Image: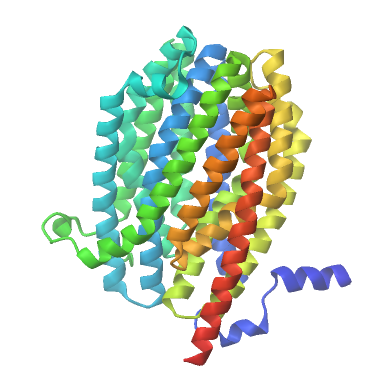
């Protein structure tokens, strides 16, 4: 009975909600969350199948693809951060019942995303293989050959990713996460089928995997660009006026006030991960492959966290738009508790099926054994530290504290993750294990800093609202 009371208190609805100016029932929260979790699961599952197929080509191929993915995630994170800026502003407009503002936000974020993607494509094309050499140094020739092919092919999809991310974020801002789940699942299935055909039938190797990825991303973008023009959508984009109307400077400034710090944070975070990977790349092909496999599998244990990252922006953003900071505190707290619970559940399942997952990968015994160690380090720590490290700061962004998040995250990344990776991994000879321990130190610092800041922000905002 006591357990039931604790569960109800932590996750059930509360009479306090009756006094809020905006309300999210459990049904509404789950309607937002479940498609996001399903989307993350399918995306990770397809990613694993993608890596498994590439691993059939050998350690050099899977290592080469993983090195490029780490670089391109830097660009993709920038697109996602800009899209988050649009989602935050659109959510606030929805919460404030301002449909014109929501429509302006939608139009503006599409233009910003397109411009950013073309700029990033130009940078990647101009840098070409020099970027690989700069970041990874003298990697083995067969790994470099695979990396070069994969990079030159997949960079074409930058605009596709940016526009899809913007549209998906806008749909989430009005609480519609189901559409991205269904469409993303279809695109991922197409990608896996395309990989099977190009790798095993046409024998195109790494190029085949890259080509399949590009085509699936294009189809996903095209579908969303059609759906975002729906006349009944609160954040609809009217293509007739998209390029003819003068961009709204105020809306662009509001979006960039969230999106730019987020982009800098995400970009430098991924740059830090690349620098860490450049350290790992000096440990040899087996450790690179183990790192790639571990990164691929361990995301199962944190996939719900990505879903909560997206959901909390919508919920907190609408509460802020409605001007109800008590609702912000209540619903973000509830989502954070739900995130912790999901981590415990999903990691228990992951550890139970881990031996079966690892059998899918055709890597050396050394890479296999090291991957197990890395996954244990990552997911045991993530159960406690991932939610306050990454979900809480998304609530802070929705509340207008994106600049602080950026500064704290960048300092933590380079001080703890990069700095201690060099100390533990290379100088102390701990290899990839030392690098992943440094990652946990980064999470600990983030947890402390963000929790303190968020509690102070809520206390100040609620007190100010009560005095008005």
Position of residue 154 measured from the top left corner of the image (x, y, whole percent): 36, 27
Q: Is residue 330 above or below residue 445?
A: below
Q: Is residue 340 left or right of residue 181?
A: right
**Left or right of 4 on screen, residue 308:** left
The structure residue drawn at horizontal position 49% and vertical position 57%, both measured from the top left corner, is 405
**Residue furthest to the left:** 244
Q: How many marks?
A: 0
Write the residue at 58% across / 14% down. Answer: 285
Kindly give the residue lying farthest to the bottom in the view shown. 468
- Residue 87 image offset from top left, x and y in percent: 39, 60
Q: Is residue 65 left or right of residue 75?
A: right
Placement of 174 over or under 18, stated as above or below: above
Residue 273 sits above or below residue 411 on the image: above
Q: In the image shown, does 183 or 65 lie closer to the viewer?
A: 65
Write the residue at 28% across / 44% down. 116
The quarter in which the N terminus is drawn is: bottom right
* Visible residue check, residue 23: no
């Amino acid at each position: 009975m006591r357990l039931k009371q604790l569960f109800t208190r932590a996750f059930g609805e509360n009479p306090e909600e009756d006094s809020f100016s905006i309300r999210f029932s459990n049904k509404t929260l789950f309607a937002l969350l479940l498609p996001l979790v399903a989307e993350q699961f399918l995306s990770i599952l397809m990613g694993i199948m993608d890596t498994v197929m590439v691993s059939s080509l050998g350690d050099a191929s899977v290592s080469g693809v993983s090195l490029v993915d780490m670089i391109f995630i830097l660009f993709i994170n920038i697109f996602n951060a800009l899209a988050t800026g649009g989602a935050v502003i659109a959510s606030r407009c929805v919460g404030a019942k301002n449909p014109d503002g929501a429509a302006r936000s939608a139009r503006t974020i599409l233009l910003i995303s397109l411009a950013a993607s073309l700029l990033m494509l130009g940078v990647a094309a101009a840098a070409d293989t020099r970027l690989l050499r700069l970041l990874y140094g003298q990697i083995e020739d067969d790994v470099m050959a695979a990396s070069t092919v994969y990079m030159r092919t997949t960079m074409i999809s930058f605009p596709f990713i940016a526009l899809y991310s913007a549209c998906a974020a806008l749909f989430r801002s009005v609480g519609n996460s189901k559409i991205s789940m269904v469409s993303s699942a279809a695109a991922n299935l197409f990608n896996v089928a395309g990989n099977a055909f190009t790798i095993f039938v046409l024998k195109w190797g790494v190029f085949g995997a890259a080509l399949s990825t590009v085509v699936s991303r294009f189809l996903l973008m095209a579908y969303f660009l059609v759906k975002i023009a729906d006349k009944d959508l609160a954040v609809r984009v009217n293509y007739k006026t998209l390029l003819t109307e003068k961009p709204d400077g105020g809306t662009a400034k509001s979006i960039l006030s969230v999106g730019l710090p987020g982009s800098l944070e995400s970009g430098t975070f991924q740059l830090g991960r690349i620098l860490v990977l450049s350290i790992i790349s000096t440990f040899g092909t087996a450790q690179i492959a183990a790192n790639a496999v571990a990164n691929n599998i361990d995301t199962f244990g944190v996939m719900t966290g990505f879903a909560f990252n997206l959901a909390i922006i919508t919920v907190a953003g609408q509460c802020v738009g409605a001007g109800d900071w008590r609702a912000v505190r209540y619903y973000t707290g509830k989502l954070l508790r739900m995130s912790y619970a999901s981590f415990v559940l999903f990691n228990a399942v992951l550890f139970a099926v881990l031996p079966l997952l690892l059998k899918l990968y055709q890597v050396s015994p050394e890479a296999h054994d090291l991957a197990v160690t890395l996954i244990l380090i990552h997911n045991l720590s993530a159960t406690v530290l991932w939610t306050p490290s990454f979900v809480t700061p998304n609530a802070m962004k929705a509340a207008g504290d994106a600049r602080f998040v950026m500064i704290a995250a960048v300092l933590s990344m380079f001080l703890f993750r990069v700095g201690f990776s060099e100390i533990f991994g290379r100088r102390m000879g701990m290899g990839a294990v030392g690098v992943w321990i440094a990652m946990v130190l980064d999470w600990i610092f983030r947890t402390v800093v963000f929790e303190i800041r968020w509690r102070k922000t809520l206390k100040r905002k609620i007190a100010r609202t009560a005095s008005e």
